Image (cartoon, rainbow, N blue to C red):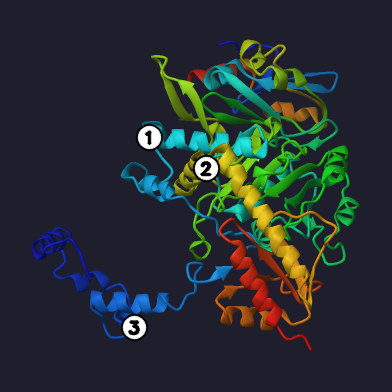
Amino acid sequence: MFTPHTIHDVEVMLKSIGVEKIEDLFQEIPEQFRYPDLSLAPRLTEMEAVAELENIASANGTTKEFLSFLGAGAYDHYIPAAVDNLLQRGEFYTAYTPYQPEISQGTLQAIFEFQSLICRLTGMDVSNASHYDGATAAAEAVILATGHFRNKRKKVLLSRALNPQYRQTIRTYMQTDGSLQILGDDAETGIDIKNLIAQIDNNTALVMVQYPDFFGRIIDYKELVETAHANGALVAMAVNPTALGLLTPPGDLGADIALGEGQPLGIPLSFGGPYLGFFAVKDALLRKIAGRLVGQTVDAEGKLAYVLTLTAREQHIRREKASSNICSNQGLMTLAATIYLSVLGKHGFRQVSNLCYQKAHYAAEQISSIHGFEVMFPETPFFHEFVIRSEQPVDELLEHLLDHDIFGGYKLENDYPELQNCLMLAVTEKISREDIDYLCNILGEVDHD
Amino acid sequence: MLVPQEFKYQKTDEWVKIVDGVATIGITDYAQDALSDVVFVEFAVDPDDEISAGDSLATIESVKAAAEVIFPVSGKVIEVNQAVVDAPEILNDQPYGDGWLIKVQVADESEMDVLLDAAAYDAYCKDR
C-alpha cells in the first residue's frame, strides 16, 4: 500500500494525538474483527497484475473484432478522431461539473453549445446540461410531470414500445410514490399505440412514447399527442438523436418533453457507460426542468459571458422542496456530443442518419428474401433498427452467428414474451454492404427443419 | 418598511386580512425587499382546494432566492391572483395592494388570534 507519509510524519502525527503506534488507533474495534483473514490471492507485481487483467479483458468480444448488429438503445457509430483528441485536452478532461462555474468559461460555453445543439435537433425551446443516461432522463420526465400537476394527477402512461430498461428505471425512481400508477406497458395493452391512446384521461399526468420506438418503428403520434393535450396531459418522447437527422423533430410533433440517450453522438459503447442523457422542454416548462442550465449574457464590461442560470430551481438552493436531486451533469460526455455534432455539421449528421436508414433497409430487404426469416411489422416505416422472426430459436441463431464473428442482435422474447423467436437488428453507417451480404450468407446456411 | 395596521402577520412574512369571512393573503414589504426582484410566482394550490394553516401556498422566485409562502389560516381557496403570475414585479411594487396572492374562505377565524399584530410584526422585523 502506498501512503505519502514518511515514518517521521507518522511519528509526529501519532505523538500529537497521544498514541504510540498506528495499531492503537484501531483499539475500538473488537479484537476478533481487527485483523481478519481476507483470504486474498497471493500478491502480484504490477507487471503480473496487468497481464492478468489483460487476460481477463481479452475474453470480451468487442465491436472491433465482431460484426455487430446489436442496438436496442446503444449504437456502434463511427467516432471521428477529432472527438477524442479534443476531449482529452487537459482544460476539459479534468473538469467535472463546475462548482465554481463562472470561472470555467470554456466549460460553460461548451455546455451552452450542447444545449443549443440539442434544441436544434429536437425542435424544443430549452435543454438542460444533461443527465446520466437516457433511462434516468426518462425518469426525470416522470418526476417533472407529476410535480407539474402537484401530484394531483395520479397516472403516468408508458408505451410498451418504450425501452424496457427506461421503464424499469422509471419504476425504480418512482417506487416510493405509492399513489402513482404507472400503466400502459402491460402485455394486454400491447404495442399498438391505439390501445395506449384509449387509456389517456384527465387523471393522466404524462404519456411517454419512443421515437423511433424500441423496435425502430416510426410511429405517427399525432393522434396520441392530440388526445393527451385534450386531456391536459403532457407528452414526452424518448428519441434517438441520430434519427433526428432525417425525421420531423419531436418539438414539431407537439411533444412537451424530448429526452433520450446521447451515446450515439460520439460516445463509445464502453460496455454500457458512461453515457449521456439529454432533456429538453418547451418554454412553458422552463422552470420545471431539473439539473443545470447554462445561459449566455454579458459581463459588467459588456463582454460575452456564460453563467449558470435559473439555479433557484435547484436542489442546492431549494433543498427538500426541489423536485429532483440532480444538480450535476455529464460534463465530459456532453462535450463529446458537442464536438461530434460540430465536427459532422448539419450535412454530415444528416448523411450519417441517411446512411443508417438506407443500409438498414437494404439489410431488411435482403433478410426478408432468405428462407425461414420474416421481417416483422412490414407495414410500419422504420429507421435503422428492425425485427426479424426466425423459424429457429433465437439462442441457436445467435450462437450460430457468433461462431462466424457476428453479434446477431437483440433477443426480444425476454422483454416481450409475445415476440417469440424475434431478433432485433441495428444497422449503422459502420456496416458495409459486404457486411450485410456476409450476414445474409450465414443466415442462409441456417438449417430450418 | 411598511406594516399596515389593519393586517395580521406571521413570522414567515405573510399578511392576512379577513373581510366577511374571506381572508386575503400576501407577502409583506419586508419579504419583497429581502427577496429583491421577484421573477416567478407559482401557486401550489388551485381554487376549491381545501387547505390548512401551514400548507404551502406558492413558491416565489427572485433573482437571488426561492421562497415558500405559507397559509396563515385554514379553509377553502376561492381565488388565486393570476396577475402576479403574469407580472411578478407587482409583488415588489405593491405587496399589500395589487400584489395580493390568494383569497380563502376561512374555516375558523379564531386561527387569527395566534398571528402577530402590526406592532408585534414590526418589532420582530426590526430585531432580525
Q: Residues within 10 Å of mark 3 (few under 14, many from 20)?
A: few
Q: Is residue A208 visible?
A: yes
Q: Position of residue A73 (x, y in %)?
A: 63, 59
| Mark 3: amino acid | Leu
Provide the secondary structure element on which disc 1 rests.
loop
A115 on left or right of B15: left
- Give the alpha-carbon distance from disc 1 to disc 3, as whole Å: 45 Å
Which mark, by number, is residue A344?
A: 2
Q: Is residue A328 above or below residue A368?
A: above
Q: Amino acid at mark 1?
A: Ser
Write down the chain letter for disc 2: A
Return the chain for callout 1.
Answer: A
The crowding category of the residue bearing disc 1, from other C-alpha atoms within 10 Å (few below 14, some 14 to 19, many at least 20), is: some
* Residue A39: % across, % down: 34, 86
**Which badge, 3 or 2, comes first in the chain's sequence?**
3
Residue B92 relative to residue A10: left or right? right
Q: Which residue is mark 1?
A: A104
Between tags 1 and 3, which lies in front?
Answer: 1
Q: Earlier in the sequence, mark 2 or mark 1?
A: 1
Circle 3 sits on which residue?
A38
Q: CA distance from mark 3 to mark 2?
A: 52 Å
What is the three-letter code of the residue carrying label 2?
Leu
| A414 w.r.t. A211: above or below | below
Q: Nearer the viewer, mark 2 or mark 1?
A: 2
The location of residue A281, given as percent across then percent down, is 67, 37
Helix, strand or loop at mark 2: helix
Residue at screen point 85% across, 54% down: A193
Viewer-closest of A37 and A138: A138
